[in-house]
Amino acid sequence: MERRHRKPGEMALIYILVFISVFSLFAAYKISGFSSLSSPGAFPMFTTIVLVVMALGVWREAKNLSPGPVSGMGEKFREVVNLLFTREVAGIILALVIYSLALEILTFIPATLLFLWGSMLFLKAGKWHKALFYSILNMVIIIVIFNFIFKVVLP
Amino acid sequence: MIDWTHLFLPLTDLSLLFLVAAGVFVGIYVGAIPGLSVTMAVSLLISFTFGWDTLDALALMIGIYVGGVYGGSRSAILLNIPGAPAAMATSFDGYPLAQRGEAGTAIGITVIQSVLGGFLGVIVLAFGAPVISSFALQFAPRDYMLLAIMGILLVGSMGQGSVFRGVFAGALGVLLGLVGMDPLTGQGRFTFNTTSLMGGINYVTAMIGLFGVSEALVQIKDVNMVAVKQKIDRIIPTWQSVIKYLPLSIRTSAIGVLIGALPGTGGDIAALLAYDHAKRTVKNPSRPFGEGAYEGLVAPESANNAAIGGALIPMLTLGIPGDAVTAIIIGALFIHGLKPGPMLMVESAHLFWVIVGSLVLANVFLLIFGLTGIKIFVKLVEIPKAILMPVIIVLSVVGSYSINNNIADIYWMIAFGIAGYFLKIYKFPVGPVILGIILGPLLDVNYRRAMRSVEDNLLAFVTDLFIHPITAVLTIAILVMILSQTGFFKMIAGYFKKEKNDFLS
């Protein structure tokens, strides 16, 4: 199905991708310049040229779509935030970052239990005791499966 | 020559038998639950089965692959939410059938057709792969390079979104695959003088982030979406209906095998093309397509399971993935010290026959598990996302840590997960990124070998692309693929179509 208008923040992302592509092209050039066609930098340069061309193609396609109904920087910024970072997504990303940092401080079992319980409560999986039950149940299943069946070292 | 001992090993070795069965069972439910995917499950499995015997790990992955490709059809039928991309075409007629109270019949048809397609794919794999493998020994580095380019172009151009986005994603993956130490000279590339990047980007971590965490975040955006429930009865189809649809089933299975065998394309594209074929060729469907036609289930379901056997052909014989799942399985083979390609069939031929045997067994278990346990399935699919998604995230953390027991891999996984989430929101496909990460180093090394063989002479390199038969075929195929996307080609095609219409009228 053809899209009729750009999503909020789409052009900004595309500009970022064009920038990354051009930056990568320079980084590829710095590997070995134009020294030879079989140098370590030759194929990276070819790849990054394709990346730049495709990024410009994406830019052109998006330019041809009609912009969304919203105007004004403030409104547009709010639309981008509403699209990308709903309450649930923002909360879980934050929880995930905290969880990964907490793994080294609290160790796996307490950090994971807190993450599971907190996330389920935050996502409104049910009352606190129901979320705690599911967290503990999943924790036990994970430990049994990964410690005893897969013999994986847990974080 | 068939190695019967290893072909029957999955049947005679109890642990392999159990692992194939467990894989199919788990795969059906993983494929069926929207938000989980076969690619996610197999990418997590690579890290979890790292310490296992290679055959055990492969048996489990093959089982999950077969079960998962079928499993997506269940939620497509019952909930109108395809559990896997390969089941998208199944929902066109599957859900309308369920709305008519024929969900059981729909499920029965999808199981039988998946098994029939799966068996056809295995037969082609068993007899075709050894032939292709001996033929592949004649492949030069430039041929591997062209096949890898074809794979990225195919997966980038035949997906749902724009070609530019698809090929951009593929090129991005190739770029990520080049990060680290150059395998031929030891020079750092895209490392920015950072020691930690000299080892490159761990593709398993990238896979888990791009397929696991990013999808969990996308699902969390719609965390309150409620599934619609359906009544299930009359599952097992009659023999008459199986025989009636057999000609269509064989044709669409053939489409599935061919599409699966092309590097970069898999069950999802096979299913869509098969559905399109059925619409064009079936003159009197049971009902109009889109309103619950049985043929609308037969075609995609036989094609997507046949594509499994097809996808394994380039994976095993050339070391080039047939789709995203086989890209991950290649990663698993590397981790176990094996190198997929023509020499695999020479040095580790037993592995090939064990895979074929596992596939046959997996299709048998698919028949058993597919026709049973529907009520359990309905309960599982109703698990709220608020409970399921945090568990998926924890599994992703465990999986990425278990590769090197390095906490930094978790941070990389989170970064890929968030990047993948942004890409998905803005309609960039992530499948090509993974394919690119796997194919990037292969492309680079083969390009440089091909270039060095002509002593960096560009004219000789280009000439070689057209004068050697195998290379010429691949070059022309790639040129056609590229040109078919341009306005010039479409104008020419439109001119010929007008000429044909004028001639016929």
Image (cartoon, coloured by chain):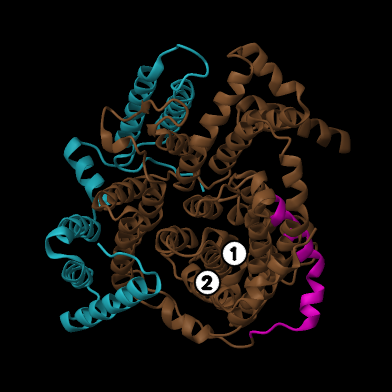
Chain colours: A cyan, B brown
Q: Which of the chains bears the disc numbered 1? A: B
Mark 2 secondary-structure assignment: helix
Please provide percent x and percent y for residue B504.
Answer: 87, 38
Q: Which of the 4 image quarters holds residue B18?
A: bottom right
At x 46%, y 65%, the residue is: B52
The amino acid at mark 1 is Phe
Query: Can residue B151 be spotted in the picture?
Result: yes
> Disc number at residue B357?
none
Tag nearer the camera, 2 or 1: 2
Do tags 2 and 1 sit on the same chain?
yes
Q: Residue at x 42, y 33 (%)?
A: B178
Left/right of residue B447 with respect to residue A119 in the rendered view: right
Residue B247 locus on image (x, y percent): 82, 66
Residue B99 figure quarter: bottom right
Mark 2 — on which chain does it sit? B
Residue B281 percent location from the top left of the image: 79, 57
- Helix, strand or loop for the magenta stretch, by majority: helix
> Taking the image as drawn, is residue B295 in sight?
no
In-image side of B17 versus B176 (left or right): right
Q: Amino acid at mark 2?
A: Gly
Q: Is residue B75 magenta?
A: no
Q: Which residue is mark 2?
A: B23
Say few, some or many: other residues with alpha carbon within 10 Å of mark 1 (under 14 / 14 to 19 / 20 or more). many
In the picture as drawn, the residue positioned furthest to the right comes out as: B504
Residue in front for this viewpoint, A61 or B67: B67
Q: Tell whether A3 sits left or right of B218.
A: right
Marks 2 and 1 in Cβ contact (< 8 Å): no
Residue of label 1: B92
The magenta stretch spans which residues?
B235-258
Q: Is residue B254 magenta?
A: yes
x and y percentages locating residue B27 in the rendered image = 51, 70
